[in-house]
C-alpha cells in the first residue's frame, strides 16, 4: 500500500497540494481525476520523490520513502511523467532497456533482455523495436515510454497522462494492457487521467482532486456520480449506464440542437 498523509506543496505562496491524505491499495488501478491545475501531477511527482513536499509523509509498504535509497526506490516504484522526450538518437529497444538500469547499471544480462522482450510484446512494439524514436508517430513513441516503465519491473507503476498522443484505439489498448498487468502480474498502477470515461471503465478506485484537495476517494460507483462530478468540474454532467458501465455525458444538448438547426437553415 502507498499511504500519503497530510501532504502539502506550495509554489509562490500558492498551495497547489493542500493537506492531502490518500491510500492506494495493492493490486488495483487507481485513477486521479480532476480539472487542469488541480494538483494531480504534483501529488504523483511527490509520491515518486521527483519533487519534495513542504509537509507530510509518504510510506510504501509501511516504509517512509524519505529513508529509502534511490536505487531501492527505483526497484519498488516506476513513474512516467508527461514530458517524456529525448533528443538522443536511440531505438525503441534501447529506450526500453533504460528501464533495466536499477538492476543492470548499463550492463544488460540475460534476465534484463527477457524483461525487455516482455515489455515490448506487452505494448505490441516488437516489430518496430529497431526503429529510431524520431521515426515513430506520437502514439508509438508514447507506447515505447510506457514499455520502458514496464521493463523496470516494479510493484508500483505511476503514469502521468499515459494516453497522451494516443488515438481511441490505442488508448483502449493501453488501458487493457494496464488491466492485464494488474491481473497477470499483480502490479499496482496509479494514473493521472483526464478522460473520466476511461477512468470509470478501467479503474478499481478513483480519487478526485480539485484546488489541491481530495474531493472524494472511492469506487467508481461512488465517484462517477452526477452530483459529485458536476461539482468537481463545474459542469453539468449526466451519467448513462451502457453495457454495465457508468458513462459520463457532458456536452450541451441545447447548444448542439441550436447548431444543428442553424446548419439546416443554411
Image (cartoon, rainbow, N blue to C red):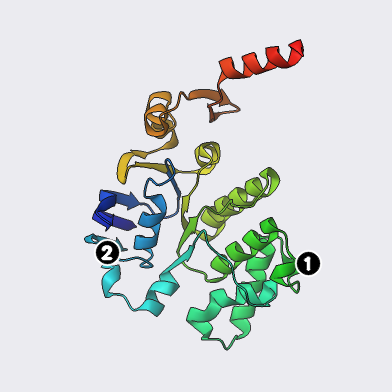
Q: Earlier in the sequence, mark 1 or mark 2?
A: 2
Q: Residue at x 42, y 33 (%)?
A: 233
**SS category of the residue bearing label 1:** helix
Residue furthest to the bottom = 107
**SS category of the residue bearing label 2:** loop
The residue that disc 2 covers is 62
For residue 238, side relative to residue 210 (left or right): right
Closer to us: 165 or 175:
165
Whole-percent x, y for residue 262 in the image: 69, 14
The residue that disc 1 covers is 127
Residue 114 tag number: none
For residue 190, side relative to residue 172 (left or right): left
For residue 259, side relative to residue 9 (left or right): right
Pick the quarter of the image with the C terminus.
top right
Q: Residue at x 64, y 65 (%)?
A: 144
Question: Which corner quadrant of the image does residue 261 belong to?
Answer: top right
Amino acid at each position: 500500500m502507498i499511504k500519503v498523509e497530510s501532504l502539502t506543496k506550495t509554489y509562490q505562496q500558492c498551495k497547489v497540494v493542500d493537506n492531502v491524505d490518500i491510500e492506494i491499495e495493492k493490486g488495483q488501478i487507481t485513477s486521479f481525476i480532476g480539472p487542469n491545475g488541480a494538483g494531480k501531477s504534483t501529488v504523483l511527482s511527490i509520491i515518486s520523490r521527483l519533487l519534495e513536499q513542504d509537509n507530510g509523509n509518504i510510506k510504501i509498504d509501511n516504509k517512509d520513502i524519505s529513508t529509502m535509497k534511490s536505487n531501492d526506490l527505483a526497484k519498488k516504484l516506476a513513474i512516467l511523467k508527461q514530458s517524456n522526450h529525448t533528443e538522443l538518437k536511440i531505438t525503441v529497444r534501447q529506450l526500453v532497456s533504460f528501464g533495466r538500469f536499477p538492476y543492470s547499471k548499463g550492463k544488460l544480462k540475460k534476465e534484463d533482455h527477457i524483461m525487455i522482450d516482455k515489455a515490448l510484446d506487452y505494448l505490441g512494439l516488437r516489430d518496430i523495436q529497431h526503429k529510431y524514436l524520431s521515426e515513430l508517430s506520437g502514439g508509438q513513441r508514447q507506447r515505447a515510454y510506457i514499455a520502458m516503465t514496464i521493463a523496470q519491473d516494479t510493484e508500483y507503476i505511476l503514469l502521468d497522462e499515459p494516453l497522451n498522443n494516443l488515438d481511441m484505439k490505442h488508448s483502449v489498448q493501453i488501458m487493457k494492457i494496464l488491466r492485464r498487468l494488474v491481473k497477470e502480474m499483480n502490479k499496482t498502477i496509479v494514473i493521472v487521467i483526464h478522460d473520466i470515461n476511461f477512468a470509470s471503465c478501467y479503474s478499481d478506485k478513483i480519487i478526485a482532486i480539485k484546488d489541491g484537495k481530495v474531493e472524494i476517494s472511492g469506487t467508481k460507483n461512488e465517484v462517477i456520480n452526477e452530483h459529485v462530478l458536476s461539482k468537481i468540474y463545474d459542469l453539468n454532467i449526466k451519467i448513462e449506464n451502457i453495457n454495465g458501465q457508468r458513462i459520463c455525458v457532458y456536452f450541451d444538448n441545447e447548444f448542439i440542437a441550436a447548431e444543428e438547426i442553424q446548419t439546416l437553415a443554411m
